[in-house]
Image (tube, rainbow, N blue to C red):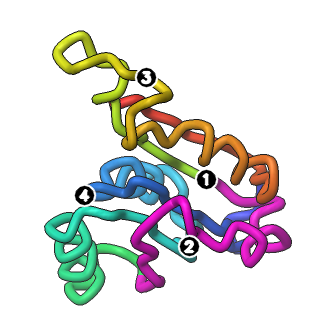
Amino acid sequence: MHHHTIIPYVSLCSGYEGIGLGLHRCIPNLRTVAYCEREAFAIANLVAKMENGLLDSAPVFADVRTFPWNSFTRLMAGGILSFGWPCQPVSVAGQRKAVDDERWLFDIIADGIAIMQPGMLFAENV
């Protein structure tokens, strides 16, 4: 991997973007091309970090259910996709509805991965 080649990066369920911040420390030529986060506070945090130069400026999409996977397919062939999907549907502290929980996003993300076919994945079940 050449250090001058830009590596595109998409962050889903971005939260405060911890995975991306870590990846940027390890891969200096990583360039975020999209974030996806539905929580308003987390979106505001992402925007503030972009404005302060702590994160790459990129669009923030508000829902993985409507994320434009096809728009990133060609770009992400050599790129990295990260996601930290919600654990509430399977948590022993919750109602354990699993796939019947409205917050169950894994199947949607898995379908998106099949469309986008990124070069690498980083997944965290938070």
Residue at the front extreme of this rendering: 100
Q: Residue furthest top?
A: 92
- Position of the C terminus, as image quadrant, is top left
Give the foreground label among 3 and 2.
Answer: 3
List x then y, in percent, for residue 36: 44, 66
- Residue 17 appears left or right of 75: left
User: Which numbered disc flags the more N-terminal residue, 4 or 2?
Assistant: 4
Viewer-side label of 4, 3: 3
Residue drawn at x 28%, y 29% is: 88
Check the picture and name the quadrant holding the N terminus.
bottom right
Residue behind mark 1: 81
| Amino acid type, residue under disc 3 in the picture | Ala
Spatial CA span between label 1 and label 3:
23 Å
Identify the residue at horizontal 32%, vertical 64% (top origin): 38
Mark 3 vs mark 2, CA separation in Å: 34 Å
Q: Nearer the viewer, mark 1 or mark 3?
A: 3
**Chain-order first, disc 4 or disc 3:** 4
